[in-house]
Amino acid sequence: MAYLFEGQPGPAIAVPPGATDTHMHIYEPGHAMAPDATIPPLDDARIDDYRILQARLGLERVVVVQPSTYGKDNTCTMEAVAAMGADARAVVVVDALAGDDELAALTKAGARGIRFHMLPGGALPWEVVPELSARAAEHGWHAQLQLDGRDLTDRLGDIAGFAGDLVIDHMGRFFEPVGPDHPGFKALLGLIAKGAWVKLSAPYLTEEDGAPAFQSVGALVKLLVAEAPERMLWASNWPHPGVDPRPDDAIMMDTLGAWIGDDAIIKGILVDNPAQLYGF
């Protein structure tokens, strides 16, 4: 299958050199689906397909995130990082059986974070957060968290157990549009005030009919950016697993530009902030 938007125009905004996609997935043939996974591998989300997207959007750096599809087997993810070279990093999934030698080897190969996907199909439960995030932090990794943002207030005690830097996916991943007074969003702002990072990505997961402006999500984004522009990140969430039809990634990049409207802040989000967090 050909890549969905091959040959179509790129984003209208000027994408600065060193722009980074901090959250995407690779699926290659020959890798088994984890028993508890809920999203099957996609057949048009290989390294060569992603390189088409990189060129189209003007992206230079990438963070390959272990998809829930492959559970704790990071082979496909790390092979992709190796193929993409010095401008690639990884967020992986490991459990308590992973020894320090394995963590050190993953770090050398480009791993910079451990993923906690607290939704159906995720590989790690809340109970392991303190131990695994602490071990990851010893290797210079951050903890990446995805959950339904509406549950943030109920999970603040568990979230307090994270060691090291915390990165929150998809602007909190609210499963429905919420306003700035929603307890979950207030909890998200509180976490940012304490040092959390946030990925400004996948607004379609919250606001299904909001493209291209995503006004409800955009109103929240402006508050997040105002709180800590130096800890905001951008991600494509390519190839948008579980989403049909898939959004146009160039439009997603332009949506960021419309939300922010400040070239210096956009450069920080696309270039400077990820360079600091992932060590580019």
Image (cartoon, helix red, strand yellow):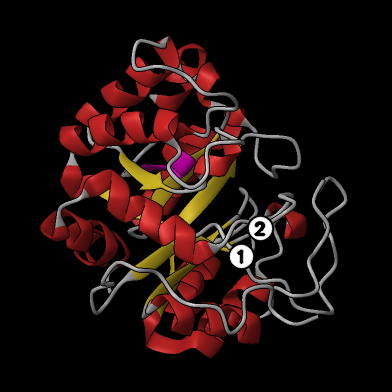
The image quadrant where one finds the N terminus is: bottom right
Q: Which mark is residue 157?
A: none
Q: Give the left or right position of residue 196, taking residue 154 as reference.
A: left
User: Which stretch is magenta?
Assistant: 166-170
Q: Give the left or right position of residue 124, taking residue 268 as reference.
A: right
Q: Please provide percent x and percent y for residue 133.
A: 45, 43
Which residue is pictured at 32% across the width and 36% down the height? 221
Depth order, front residue of 237/113? 237
Q: Is residue 174 above or below residue 95?
A: above
Query: Can see residue 212?
Result: yes
Which residue is pictured at 69% across the width and 73% down the height? 4
Tag 1 near tag 2, CB within 8 Å: yes
Asked whether 106 falls inside the magenta stretch, the response is no
- Callout 2: SS: loop
Disc 2 crowd, CA 10 A, few/some/many (<14, 14-19, 20+): many
Query: Can see residue 274?
Result: no
Residue type of the residue flagged with mark 1: His
Disc 1 marks which residue? 25
Q: Please provide percent x and percent y for residue 16.
A: 23, 74
The chief SS type of the magenta part is strand
